[in-house]
Image (spheres, grey):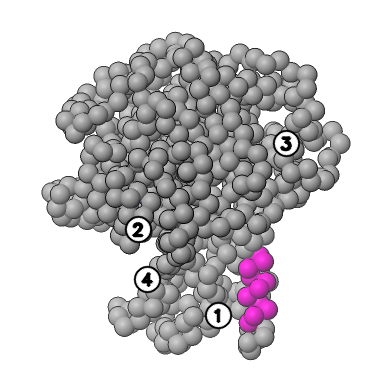
Amino acid sequence: MPTDHPRIRTTEEYQYAYRRSVENPEQFWADVAEPFTWRRKWDTVLTADLVEGHNKWYEGAKLNITENCLDRHLSTRGNKLALIWEPNDPKTRQIRYTYRELHQEVCRFANVLHNNGVEKGDRVCLYMPMIPQLAIAVLACARIGAVHSVIFAGFSANAIADRVNDAQATVVITADGLERGAKQIPVKRVVDEALEHCPSVRGVIVVEHLGWPVHMKDGRDVWYHDEVQEVEKTCPAEEMDAEDPLFILYTSGSTGKPKGVVHTTAGYMVWADYTFRNVFQVEENDVYWCSADIGWVTGHTYLLYGPLLSGATTLMFEGVPTYPSPGRYWEVIDKHGVNVFYTSPTAIRSLMAHDINHVLAYSLDSLRVLGSVGEPINEEAWHWYHTHIGKGRCPIVDTWWQTETGGIMISALANITPSVPARAGLPLPGVQPVLLNQEGQEIEGNDVEGYLAIKAPWPGIIRTTYGDHERAKQTYFGVYSGYYFTGDGARREADGLYRIQGRVDDVINVSGHRFGTAEIENAINQNNTVVESAVVGYPHDVKGQGIYAYVICRDGACDDDISRKHVEASIIETIVAEIGRIAKPDKIQFVEGLPKTRSGKIMRRILRKVAEGDTSNLGDITTLLDPEIVEKIVEGRK
Ligand code: WTA
């Protein structure tokens, strides 16, 4: 994009930038940050601490990220489209906002937040459909310095309550209802249920979207359309410190409840913009589409902040890939002339399964760059995407990153660095990946594999887990002291490109959504008939990983098929209530016992093998408390 921000255009420029970012990170990141709008420049570029996890970027600087997303573009791009919204139902109206209009809408929403008592530093939770007001509300929070925490509108009331309470949010923003494909969710009702257990919440702002009747609680709930009547169209941006928190996003780890990953203002901004600009190589007149929901980090960084910081036109889609037909994505691409398209392997795999005529009905001529994110993309899906969607001419950027990294870490830069099937590729400038062995020593050379860790801070690095820094320290910095630990395994291939092999901890990645096995087990164990459970992931054709649950029932509760069916349904109900529909197990197997060591530890390795159907070589089971249980589990396999 021809702007004041230079971007990498050749392999040599990539190599040069990479070298500089390693040799002199402070100078490198000072140069990258220079063209943004700062109220005050920084005193120190970087304070690095990969032992305690107290990493800081651009300390002393003052800014507001929305001035960089919006105000900064008004003089040159005021009439350029900032946001295109495509509704769930293709027959209803699309909505478009220029940068000037989006600026105004954000200011108005910010004023409504102010009028409802939201102040700098307050936490605001959002539980919303994928409608423009979600994007606007997120930016409105940032405008006034409130910390946004978006909760994917598929989580249950209990899951919302956990997050709202952890964040001690004072205000929740929601809508009357949500439609996702043919599904409907009464989001306001779910919020009402959650808020029965959330004493910190003083107000609820409700956006009217579908015209559904909702209950408005006196003294707590207000309609957005009423509130916005009286407010000004401008709203001065709050001056924020570089390290003031921008948002909290809850994500699952291998233990306990989901944790609130905290990102701060300046470093996240620079990282979102730098990675977006260089990976996707979006041109000034392009339409860019990231199909992720704003409820996940991909939606934060690459639907909203990255594109707007770069002055791009970003498309937001309310629906799902298969509604009203499996040609919907391709229809949207032709309709809006999408040039750069970023989606998930799960979406690709689910669409591959349908008649190819759903693709052939569209030209897809506008496409130039394709992206993939959230989980490993298998070779078959890569080739299908490359051949049928990219028509062999579009590079695929397979972007590896995490909620905790804020933005893309390892990926091809479109048309610049190598794009090879099933390999994420090379690290971005500023990212120093290493592969560690069990002892935490770096494995040198190529054609090797190990635990993926990062040995220097980058601007988008997680700052803390909300309200509990010790947890962040232990999870990310304490595993191998002096490194950020990713939880992923990886190979460095003979050509030096990275291949991500998946999680090495107890996290399952289902359709690109992260769940901790412990989190799902805790939910299952809430069910009265359950004595104990163990959850593992297993390879799933469409979702990448499926959820396989082994469950021990109370005596007599699951003795025949009918009672087993009944208990199964009730377990699913419990999970839906505790976490949400997205965490529903694909298979539930009732077992008499679990394979445990003499010290009582569940041998998940065995359970994983059984779930995979690979029972020929279960390894050494002699150390088990009750080796016979394994045979019974194998026999009962689903
Ligand atoms: C996985 C999503 C392989 C990985 C941005 C990581 C990937 C987790 C890729 C983070 C990829 C993400 N190839 N695996 N291109 N991208 N992952 O926090 O296991 O929702 O640790 O962030 O997804 O998931 P999260």
Q: Which residue is mark 4?
A: 605
Is residue 570 located in the magenta-colored stretch of the structure?
Answer: yes
Give the residue type that dot 1 points to: Phe
Q: Which mark is residue 384?
A: 2
Identify the element where label 2 is drawn.
helix
Label 3: which residue? 207
Upstream in sequence: badge 3 or badge 2: 3
Query: Up-down: is 245 above or below 615?
Result: above
Q: CA distance from mark 4 to mark 2?
A: 33 Å
Sooner in the amino-acid sequence: mark 4 or mark 2: 2
The residue type indicated by label 2 comes to Trp
Q: Residues within 10 Å of mark 4 (few under 14, many from 20)?
A: few
**Magenta region:** 564-574
Does 176 sit above or below residue 553? above
Question: Left or right of 499: which side holds 493?
Answer: left
Tell me if mark 2 has few (under 14), some (14-19) or many (20+) residues whose alpha carbon lies within 10 angstroms of its own.
some
Q: Residue at x 31, y 83 (%)?
A: 616
Check disc 1 and report its element: helix, strand or loop. Answer: strand
Which residue position is annotated with label 1? 590
Which numbered disc, 4 or 3, marks the residue closer to the eye? 3
* Three-letter code, disc 3: Val
